[in-house]
Image (spheres, rainbow, N blue to C red):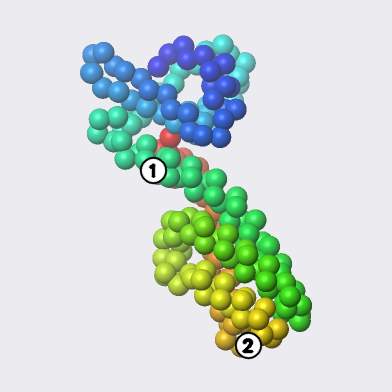
Amino acid sequence: MPDFPVKTIEYALLFNVPFFVFYTSITSKSIKYIWLQKYVELELNNKKPNWREQEKVTLYFPEENDLDSNTVKIYNILTEHRAKIESLEFLKLYEELVLHAESFASGEYEVSRYCVDLCVRLIKIQWLINYLGINTHSHGSNINIFNLKDAFHNIYTNNHVSSDDFTVIWDQLAMLERIKTEIISKDTFNEIAYDHANIIPF
């Protein structure tokens, strides 16, 4: 698509939701699409770094991005976007859990009540843990936030940490750390996949 306004691109970049551009070909009667923000990130920024200095740019639509035959890619893009948003919440909760778990390990058992609350908030984004856990060891099947919550609750109730609860907590935190690693490395993986394996995320 030639002559696409740069101002429109800059406007789209102001938003945190996927902005799609659709292109209809009269000759082939097909409708193509791209995820504009990701296109800018991987295509324009890397291959035409001075694109902002132009009034218009040309957008290229991957052959696979056909609205009739590949709507599943749009679903996948929206799923990835949801994962990215919820990943920020996950990272915050995970780091707080690690911090406070170290506190109760030194005898400050009262913080375990707050850890219960953190686990409840993690349960609310269980979808994300399941989604990203697929790429981790055992496909995330051993991650159980309910068990983690119960272990913290036991410590708060008994003002004591048993060896079983200690094991549950550190085993679960170790598995959640793999989710953290998956989140942190995701953008890098997308770039490598695009540059070297021709996997197009936009």
What numbered label is drawn on residue 162?
A: 2
Q: Assign the N terminus to one quadrant of the image.
A: top left
Inspect the image, locate mark 1, and give the three-letter code of the amino acid beneath it: Asn
Q: Distance between the residues labelled 1 and 2?
A: 43 Å
Q: Which residue is drawn at 56% across and 11% down?
A: 55
Q: Residue at x 46, y 45 (%)?
A: 80
Q: Which of these two is toward me, 108 or 38? A: 108
Q: Is residue 98 visible?
A: no
- Within 10 Å of disc 2 (Cα), the crowding (few <14, some 14-19, many 20+) is few
Which element carries disc 2, helix, strand or loop?
loop
- Of labels 1 and 2, earlier in sequence is 1
| Residue at image mark 1 | 76
Inspect the image, locate mark 2, and give the three-letter code of the amino acid beneath it: Ser
138 versus 10 height, above or below: below
Q: Which of these two is toward me, 121 or 32? A: 121
x, y percentage for residue 95?
66, 61
Which element carries disc 1, helix, strand or loop?
helix
Q: Residue at x 42, y 69 (%)?
A: 141
Instruction: Give residue 10's quadrant in the image.
Output: top right
Q: Which of these two is toward me, 200 or 15? A: 15
Task: Determine contact: label 1, label 2, CB under 8 Å.
Answer: no
Give the farthest residue toward the front.
Answer: 157
71 versus 24 height, above or below: below
Q: Assign the C terminus to one quadrant of the image.
A: top left
x, y percentage for residue 111?
72, 72
Between tags 1 and 2, which lies in front?
2
Q: Can residue 156 be seen in this view?
A: yes
Residue 197 located left or right of residue 124 = left
